[in-house]
Image: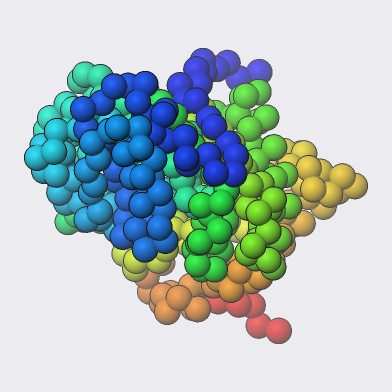
Amino acid sequence: MQPFDIQNRTRFIFGEGAISRLGDLSAQYRPACVMVVSDRGIMEAGHDAAAIASLKAAGLRVESFHDFAENPTSAMVDAGVRRAAHVKPDLLVGLGGGSSMDCCKGINFVYSCGGTIHDYHGVGKATCDLLPMIAIPTTSGTGSEAQSFALISDAETHAKMPCGDRRAAFQIAILDPVLTLTQPPKVTALTGIDALSHAIETYVTKRRNPMSIAYSRRAFGMLASGFPRVLADPTDLDARGQMQLGACLAGMAIETSMLGAAHAMANPLTARHSITHGQAVGMMLPSVIRMNGSLHPDWYGELMREIEPATGDDKAVERLATCVTGWLRQAGLATTLEELSIADTEIAALADDSLKQWTGTFNPVPLNIERSCDLYRSVARKPAV
């Protein structure tokens, strides 16, 4: 049995309307200034105003930073650090999707410890304690609220830099499913597929352990049940709650189990062709499941029995891969490179880039150039009928 050393560093608060508690929760840190990190879409949805109102009701001075976008870059982190240097916060709030929470962590690394975000690429690179942070996810995808990693892209090369340190964990995560009701359908689809990929990948990594298995398995059960429901009825608040908790549990699994080949294959698609992460990882996942299933059909059997108790190990791999493809289609997402206008001539370069991704090192079936090329070829185009 795989040994583990796990300490939950984040307090999780779940419930409808939980965002109203932000001010009181923040006040316990006695901050002179709170800086809210949220993108402009969150402002338009009104969540930024709700957070600020709660903070001000608690008598706190509030400043904001909004100048970043999806897949935050080193340049966006630099802009946030300049804003922090001006307003001098002693508490940060990451409000929004994974981009907001990752950008918040990235700003904290550099503002608290100096240098540039490149100095924190890797694990355990923080040189001092970071400011306390509170996460308020408004999507059900990355699970960043449960992780001590920030994923920041280099502004020049677009390479993704995982920056992890135990001191970069949020002190508090407020999970309010009401906030996820404002997601556009496309965001619901992309983040939902991302969360499902986390539950599935963490279940089979080389670092899987009894704790991560429990997180992954329960996350998959909640997400696989909730995802079709929120696609069919975006106002289903119970299903939204399932998705938010499932994404959080999958994030907890990532923290101790890491990810695998589907993420290693997805990152070059994002870097080279600006394919949204959820789209990229979802498209690659069925082929990765089939590859890993050649070694561990029993693991996928356990996972499938969370939603289909009668599924045997001999049927589980193909059944799970088919389920993922079905969810992609239900969500209106592409299942082939051809649909994304990516030519076969790109495969060699994509495969080479995939072997440089850290997540691939945790995959149960080791990646090499042949396997990587085969995985991309498997999704090049729909099979002839």
Q: Is residue 288 visible?
A: no
309 shown above or below 345? above
- The tally of labels here is 0
Name the residue at 54% across, 68% down.
185
Q: Is residue 18 visible?
A: yes
Question: Is 235 on the left or on the right of 173, as rendered?
Answer: right
Q: Percent position (x, y) of residue 221?
A: 72, 44
Taking depth in this image into account, of 371 and 262 the one nearest to the observer is 262
Name the residue at 53% across, 39% down.
18
Res 24 quadrant in image: top left
Taking depth in this image into account, of 53 and 120 the one nearest to the observer is 53
| Image quadrant where one finds the C terminus | bottom right
Specify the farthest residue to the bottom.
385
Name the residue at 55% across, 76% down.
381
358 shown above or below 38? above
Taking depth in this image into account, of 118 and 98 the one nearest to the observer is 98
Name the residue at 56% across, 63% down.
189
| Image quadrant where one finds the N terminus | top right
Question: Is 185 on the left or on the right of 22, as rendered?
Answer: right
Q: Percent position (x, y) of residue 48?
A: 36, 51
Q: Percent position (x, y) of residue 77?
A: 20, 46
